Image (cartoon, helix red, strand yellow):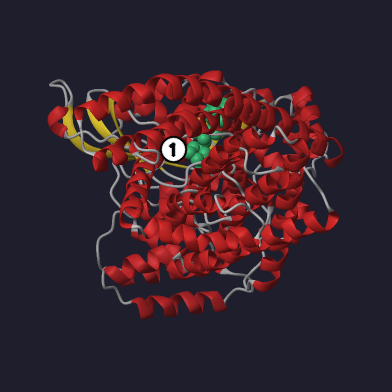
Amino acid sequence: MKSLLNTKSQTCCSTPDNVSCSSDRIVLVGSPNVGKSVIFNALSDSYAIASNYPGTTVEISKGDGVIGNKKYEIIDTPGSYSLLPITEEERVAQRLFFEKASIYLHVIDAKNLRRMLPHTLQLIEAGKPLILVLNMMDEAAERGIRIDIQKLEQMLKIPVIPAVSNKGEGIEELKKTISEYSSNPQDFTIKYNDDIENAIKDIESNLKENYEVSKRSISQLLLQRDQVAFERIQEKGEDVDAIKDIVSNTENKFNTPTNYVMTVERQQLTNRIVNSVTKIKEPYLYNNSKATESEKYEDNYPNLKKRLDHLVSNPLTGIPILLLVLYFGFYQFVGVFAAGTVVDFLEGVVFGEHLIPWITQNFNSLVPYPLIQSLIVGDYGIVNLALTYAIALILPIVGAFFFVFSIIEDSGYLPRLAMLIDRVFKKIGLSGRAVIPLVLGFGCGTMATMVTRTLEKPREKILTTLLLSLAIPCSAQLGVILGIMSAKPSALLLWVVVMILEFLFIGYIAAKVLPGEKPSFFLEIPSLKVPKLSNVLIKTYSRMQWYFLEVMPLFIIASILIWLGKITGIFGLLIELLKYPTQWIGLPSEAADVFLLGFFRRDFGAAGLYELNKTGVMNGVDMLVAAVTLTLFMPCIAQFMMTLKERGLKIALSMAAFIFPFAFFVGFVVNYIMNILGVTL
Ligand SMILES: Nc1nc2c(ncn2[C@@H]2O[C@H](COP(=O)(O)OP(=O)(O)OP(=O)(O)O)[C@@H](O)[C@H]2O)c(=O)[nH]1
Ligand SMILES: [Mg+2]
């Protein structure tokens, strides 16, 4: 699967003369949502999505950048809180830690120094060439926090650069510091208690090989039973058993896990540093010495934002606001405007009246072979099906969705929505964290399946992947369904109700059946921000580009497969077979075509439904049943491949085996109930 992000990499040969050819690396690390991707974008020639919610970056992205007159490979990593990873994407960042890098940039949020500095201390101890970027200085200032940068530099013995990276402030200074950086390993150590120190020394003396990080630092990781560190020393052929003995002996000396003991001591040192370098301005100072750090900040949060924050987070006002966002953002803008007005114009006028007749005519006169003609310009040919659907139908809908989604994500609304929904989600075995991949699923299920990496527990990942495959329609499908059914609002409403019930029902049952640990909910809540138009546009563009590159080849492959299926007769046979379940759920047999298309892509099927609707063979109830069945249907090929990649063959196949009969079963039940009640729509 292609990376979500552009990874342009040039060879040294293409470097201009005045730029030295080097493979030096700059690695950006730090907690989620501190601005790493914004800085990556400023330093490199590539683009990584930057959003106002934690866990935007789930894969490493690479780009090249010229700083001073030297060329660097720049690497953006998923957020990680410390050197000890918990989630999968933190592990991604950690693996890189054992590789060579010329410079590490630790990006932290200046208003959360106390929480983020322990990670800096770990990086310094690892002997990595390090620059500390104190980002979000504007928000720190807003809360009355003053940081003495020079003093912090002296205490840590590394360069510290204050920045407001989304406004470009501090970037030039950062570049200058990078180009002047002379990588002297720092002689900075945190002194732990004697038992820990002795264990560290013992482990160090057992490590015979050379590493890219200090032995002291590896020993500390081993002492905390870090998996990646153990993998690393095993690869190098060290005496793992002897080291494990030291680790267990040390653990026996404490009542609490070694990891905890060390974290507390590191935090104490951090507190001493933070107390001596920061000042909170008087008017902002919270007059309660027992208040926690976050409570103090809470009090310093500007008033308007605080009120708005309260409105969106409190269920009484939050739920109506959510409904308004859904109605205007998704129904009106994506459904009515993009899937209705824009698609009608593009598909009906631009493609239908001009482009397709023109291409067909010219092609047919140039290539007089009917077989080839049907492949290229036939009803299901590449031009009619792949190009028209991908460009005139799907692209505007996906674009509109990502435009709205980018505004929402940039404002910081998503994590608040996660908090709001957490309680309901607990009942279906999920945590509020799952809101982000699930909402993203309304855009593109493939992308969303990848984002399930940000979830903590395997069980929650499986559940979310299943719900994404089963119950969440992607924007292309949603757009088409909204477009068709907006003519029959009651059918649309019923469709929404059936989907919600089914989502909750499957979630509830799956949560009961699936073994595994339940998720805890911990999500950092970023500040509310006014979304920046340029940021929203560039994000929408980059996601559309990704979607387009992902979709286009699949559409073309699907067209070819359909063509092959048609000329070999396999297609006809499959349609005949599919007619049984189709009729069983009360639909006209023509709908079998739609379901077969749905095999190739779910939105493809929805587009088929759109065509079928135009012929007028289906009534309101039929449309409802078809839309329900199709939404539940197997996801598109791309999403299936991603599920396979993220969850493995066994789980992906089990999901598929469940989804197919289940979709028809629900279609049957809906049709049955409608008939019994004598509903006409
Ligand atoms: N106020 C303010 N906002 C910033 C600053 N730098 C970045 N942001 C915003 O903070 C949010 C997070 O930025 P990202 O670059 O996505 O953060 P990240 O560290 O890559 O996050 P993950 O990929 O989730 O780990 C975005 O909305 C940025 O526009 C800053 O200096 N000040
Ligand atoms: Mg990022």
Question: Please, what secondary structure does the residue beneath circle 1 have?
Answer: helix
- Say which of 239 and 561 sits in front: 561
Q: Which residue shows up at 37% across the image and 52% down it?
A: 97
Q: Is residue 466 left or right of residue 85?
A: right
Exactly how many numbered labels are in the figure? 1
Q: What x and y, as percent, mark residue 555?
A: 39, 42
Q: What x and y, as percent, mark residue 666?
A: 68, 60
Q: Residues within 10 Å of mark 1 (few under 14, many from 20)?
A: many
For disc 1, the marked residue is: 547
Q: Which residue shows up at 77% across the image and 54% down it?
A: 424
Q: Which residue shows up at 44% across the image and 54% down it?
A: 642
Note whether residue 136 is visible: no
Q: Is residue 274 left or right of residue 621?
A: left
Q: What x and y, as percent, mark residue 301?
A: 74, 29
Q: Is residue 318 above or below residue 93?
A: above
Is ligand 2 less than 8 Å from the beta carbon at label 1? Answer: no
Q: Is residue 667 above or below residue 142?
A: below
Q: Is residue 647 left or right of residue 672?
A: left
- Say which of 226 and 500 sits in front: 500
- Say which of 128 and 433 sits in front: 433
Note whether residue 449 is visible: yes
Three-letter residue code for mark 1 = Tyr
Q: Which residue shows up at 72% across the image and 64% down it?
A: 508
Figure quarter occupied by ligand 1: top right
Q: Is residue 494 left or right of residue 585?
A: right
Q: What x and y, as percent, mark residue 290?
A: 80, 45
Location of residue 664 by image quarter: bottom right
Q: Quadrant of the C terminus?
A: top right
